[in-house]
Image: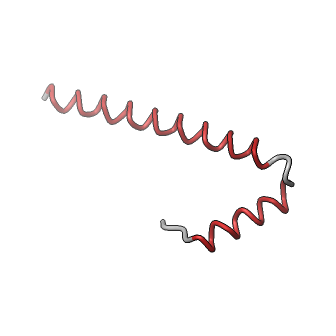
Amino acid sequence: MNLGIGEIAIILFVALLFFGPSKLPELGKAAGTSLREFKKAVSGLMEEEDKENLKK
């Protein structure tokens, strides 16, 4: 899924309308933290799978 500049601008505009300018930094920080934790979990699972495949 590739988003262009126009699509990102529309998403940000809609988010600004819904949440207001004071909430956007908090939402961005929460989204970044969630994404970082998700990536850590996925990489941990992939490492475990690789270790299991090497044992076989």
- Residue 16 vs 29, above or below: the answer is below
User: Total of numbered circles in the picture?
Assistant: 0
* Residue at x 63%, y 74% (from the top left corner): 6
Q: Position of residue 21 (x, y in %)?
A: 84, 53
- Residue 24 vs 10, above or below: the answer is above
53 left or right of 4 in image = left
* Residue at x 19%, y 33% (from the top left corner): 53
Q: Residue furthest bottom?
A: 6
36 left or right of 18 in image = left
Q: Quadrant of the C terminus?
A: top left
11 left or right of 49 in image = right
Colour mapping used in the image: secondary structure
* Residue at x 76%, y 41% (from the top left corner): 26
* Residue at x 54%, y 68% (from the top left corner): 3
Q: Position of residue 28 (x, y in %)?
A: 69, 46
Q: Position of residue 32 (x, y in %)?
A: 61, 42
**Among the 4 quarters of the image, the one containing residue 7:** bottom right
48 left or right of 13 in image = left
Q: Position of residue 23 (x, y in %)?
A: 82, 46
Q: Nearer the viewer, residue 49 or 2?
A: 2
**Among the 4 quarters of the image, the one containing residue 30:** top right
- Residue 20 vs 51, above or below: the answer is below
